Image (spheres, coloured by chain):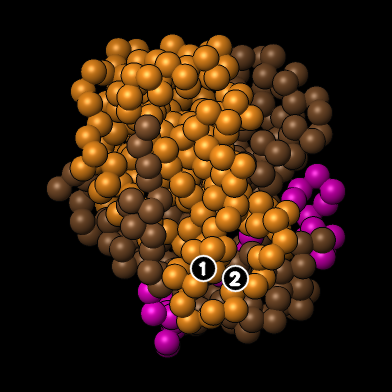
Chain colours: A orange, B brown
Amino acid sequence: MSLVLDSTAQDLLFREARTANTFSDEPVTEEQVQAIYDLVKYGPTSMNQSPLRVVLVRSAEARERLVPLMSEGNQAKTATAPLVAILAADNEFHEELPQLFPHFPQAKDFFGDRSVREHTAALNATLQAGYFIVGVRAAGLAAGPMSGFDSAGVQKEFLDDDHTPLMIINIGKPGDNAWHPRSPRLSYDEAVTTV
Amino acid sequence: MSLVLDSTAQDLLFREARTANTFSDEPVTEEQVQAIYDLVKYGPTSMNQSPLRVVLVRSAEARERLVPLMSEGNQAKTATAPLVAILAADNEFHEELPQLFPHFPQAKDFFGDRSVREHTAALNATLQAGYFIVGVRAAGLAAGPMSGFDSAGVQKEFLDDDHTPLMIINIGKPGDNAWHPRSPRLSYDEAVTTV
């Protein structure tokens, strides 16, 4: 084996983990979400920008505002998942850089231009979204990430002009018939080349 | 504990894993990269688009073309890392969708517009870059992801108009003084809100 990670963990995080389309009624606790965050917050970002922000949709009122903003195929599962999380990029992340990157106080000055900030915030927050999905699986939960939603509507209802929604993730224990059959993946030679 | 993943694996992937700035001479083998890919290829993407493409820079000639395209602070480590990988988004990923998403043959038709493809390819390939970094760590290797490079130059030298570079990652066993001190992270309450 070329991997150091034990095979149980490999299965939990990647090989047996699947995108769930139905969920059981078992709640996702605050402690679980905090444990996920406190693990994946260590994943690397450029200059430790850490621009990912998460909005947990817990109240019935908030869920009712969110569901109609999902594309039709995502509405039923978003209405019934134990927990729904909106993942967003903070385009004003540079305000936190003096705290997050203390050994280089000039770092904030690189990001005076909003379009530069939006580009790097999207890149780094999406990288963190990848870590977050791995973290949900590390908690023994299934993640159902979705990019089919009214982005401007979600931003207006749940965020502000400084936060761009990236994806919405249903989280919980899988329910009945939770999976589609596993789709094929590209082979190593199709995805990786050497120069 | 709210996590199912064992604490050794938590440490390997997140808590003790660090972005390396120096590397040992030990080579990174083809078998290791293939094992990483064959694990992380299962990470979810929207409609299984799987737009991440990886270029492994193995030859001395290719390394010599890459180093001057890195920003100054990234040149020395890129010159000496055992392996350097260019991670890119394939903006023509829709050509593979009939193979990757076989139960919905019309999927390809959603992506006739190049600007739509570029947006979703960047999002999903960056998500896969997050899984890839986790996979490098799963192989017991350190990753040094970098976004400071001449993107147009890397695209011209190593890719083509259909592939957008996302980041460049140095990979290997850590060397002497490989780490900066760990920078602080945002607390749970700073990054996560509930509605």
Q: Residues within 10 Å of mark 1 (few under 14, many from 20)?
A: many
Give the x, y percent position of residue A29. Answer: 22, 35
- Give the quadrant of the C terminus of chain B: top left
Q: Residues within 10 Å of mark 2 (few under 14, many from 20)?
A: some
Three-letter residue code for mark 1? Leu
Q: Which mark is residue A97?
A: 1
Disc 1 chain ID:
A
Q: Are marks 2 and 1 in contact (CB under 8 Å)?
A: yes
Q: Is residue B167 left or right of residue A167?
A: right
Q: Secondary structure at mark 2?
A: helix
Q: How many marks do you count on the picture?
A: 2
Residue occupying the point 71% across, 69% down: B149
Please check the rendered image and state whether residue B160 is part of the magenta-colored stretch, yes or no: yes
Of residue A95 and residue A184, the one placed in the foreground of this image is: A95
Of residue B117 and residue B55, the one placed in the foreground of this image is: B117
Task: Please report the bounds of the magenta region as a residue range.
Answer: B153-182
Q: Secondary structure at mark 1?
A: helix
For the residues marked 2 and 1, what is the alpha-carbon distance in whole angstroms? 6 Å
Give the x, y percent position of residue A46. Answer: 55, 64
Q: Is residue A134 left or right of residue B162?
A: left
Please check the rendered image and state whether residue B52 is part of the magenta-colored stretch, yes or no: no
Disc 2 chain ID:
A
Disc 2 designates what residue? Answer: A108
